[in-house]
Image (spheres, rainbow, N blue to C red):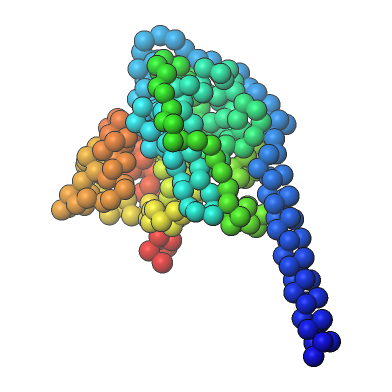
């Protein structure tokens, strides 16, 4: 009996020791990933205009690129994700953060998900914004620099990661955008000025983040249930334009949940030609299986 109890005791001690070692390894690796810097991606100058027309266009583009959906109605920052023991992610207060950034630093942040201090910008949509043209980037920066400071909520706080979240990071399942982007080979969709080419540029920089990346096959990430965009072929051009302007979808002009909200709050900023260009590009997509419906 004593021998059995001794074996049981040392087995328990061994298991506890193993668990502690695993936890220490997970913490160490996740901490490295959380604190890693990406200063090897150089800053590149971008021309920022300051005339009234450019600022007005920049405001429209900030709407098209739906910055407020993550950063709040007044760009004051907000809680973006909060899952107990996993992570709490908050978006930055653009009205107070932007003045500390140079134009080149802002362009790198938007395109490469790399903050001024070299750290990864967690949950930032750079994978979608990477191909943004210098012209659009410059005008957006010109508008964002006109924002008046808005106080950050006392409850906003900082990003934090729980034990499960750290395990997910180690497993490579928590997106580290600064690692995922191919910083050396940026797609240049903006050079094609045809209607379809313009539509591809807008689709890649406005829609791909929710709808499954460049292939647009749909996504279930974060429960968004975003369908493959081949669904657009079911619309006539006028109906598609109406949907983006109002959020009223299909022949019955039904509410389409989160997409309708995005249309009413952001995509109504698209011009008719931009809506038609997106429609024209989506008509070229091959038939795809909708991930979100599986």
Measuring 71% from the left and 30% from the top, which residue is drawn there? 39
Whether residue 74 is visible, yes or no, is yes
Height in image: 246 above or below 175?
above
Residue 76 falls left or right of residue 255: right
Most extreme residue toward the bottom, as rendered?
A: 1
Most extreme residue toward the top, as rendered?
A: 51
Whether residue 270 is visible, yes or no, is no
Find residue 286 and report its image quarter.
bottom left
Most extreme residue toward the left, as rendered?
A: 252
Height in image: 203 above or below 85?
above
Q: Which of 62 and 16 is in front in this view?
A: 16
Height in image: 163 above or below 3?
above
Which image quarter is the C terminus in? bottom left
From the top left corner, tell me how far across and down residue 162 is, in percent.
58, 51
Residue 45 falls left or right of residue 134: right
Residue 263 falls left or right of residue 24: left
Most extreme residue toward the right, as rendered?
A: 3
Measuring 78% from the left and 77% from the top, which residue is drawn there? 9
Which image quarter is the N terminus in? bottom right
Measuring 53% from the left and 49% from the top, which residue is drawn there? 87
Measuring 65% from the left and 42% from the top, which residue is drawn there? 34
Q: Nearer the viewer, residue 235 or 264?
A: 264
From the top left corner, tell me how far across and down residue 89 is, in percent.
50, 42
Q: Nearer the viewer, residue 146 or 272?
A: 146
From the top left corner, tell me how far across and down residue 138 is, in percent.
49, 20
From the top left corner, tell me how far across and down residue 21 is, in percent.
76, 60
Find residue 13 and report its image quarter.
bottom right
Q: Which of 31 and 64 is in front in this view?
A: 31
């Amino acid at each position: 009996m004593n021998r059995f109890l001794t074996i049981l005791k040392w087995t328990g001690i061994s298991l506890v020791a193993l668990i502690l070692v695993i936890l220490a390894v997970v913490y160490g690796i996740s901490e490295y990933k959380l604190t890693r810097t990406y200063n090897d991606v150089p800053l590149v100058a971008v021309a920022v205009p300051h005339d009234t027309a450019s600022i007005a266009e920049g405001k429209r583009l900030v709407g098209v690129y739906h910055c407020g959906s993550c950063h709040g109605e007044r760009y004051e920052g907000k809680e973006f994700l909060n899952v107990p023991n996993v992570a709490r992610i908050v978006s930055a207060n653009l009205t107070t953060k932007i003045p500390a950034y140079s134009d080149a630093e802002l362009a790198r942040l938007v395109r490469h998900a790399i903050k001024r201090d070299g750290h990864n910008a967690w949950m930032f949509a750079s994978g979608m914004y990477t191909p943004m043209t210098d012209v659009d980037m410059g005008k957006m920066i010109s508008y964002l620099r006109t924002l008046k400071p808005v106080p950050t909520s006392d409850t906003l706080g900082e990003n934090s990661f729980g034990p499960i979240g750290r395990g997910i990071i180690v497993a490579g399942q928590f997106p580290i955008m600064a690692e995922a982007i191919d910083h050396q080979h940026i797609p240049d969709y903006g050079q094609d000025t045809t209607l379809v080419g313009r539509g591809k540029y807008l689709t890649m920089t406005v829609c791909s983040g929710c709808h499954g990346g460049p292939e647009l096959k749909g996504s279930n990430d974060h429960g968004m249930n975003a369908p493959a965009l081949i669904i657009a072929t079911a619309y006539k051009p006028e109906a598609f334009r109406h949907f983006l302007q109002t959020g009223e979808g299909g022949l019955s002009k039904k509410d389409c949940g989160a997409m309708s909200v995005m249309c009413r709050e952001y995509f109504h900023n698209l011009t008719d030609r931009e809506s038609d260009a997106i429609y024209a590009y989506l008509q070229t997509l091959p038939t795809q299986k909708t991930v979100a419906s599986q």
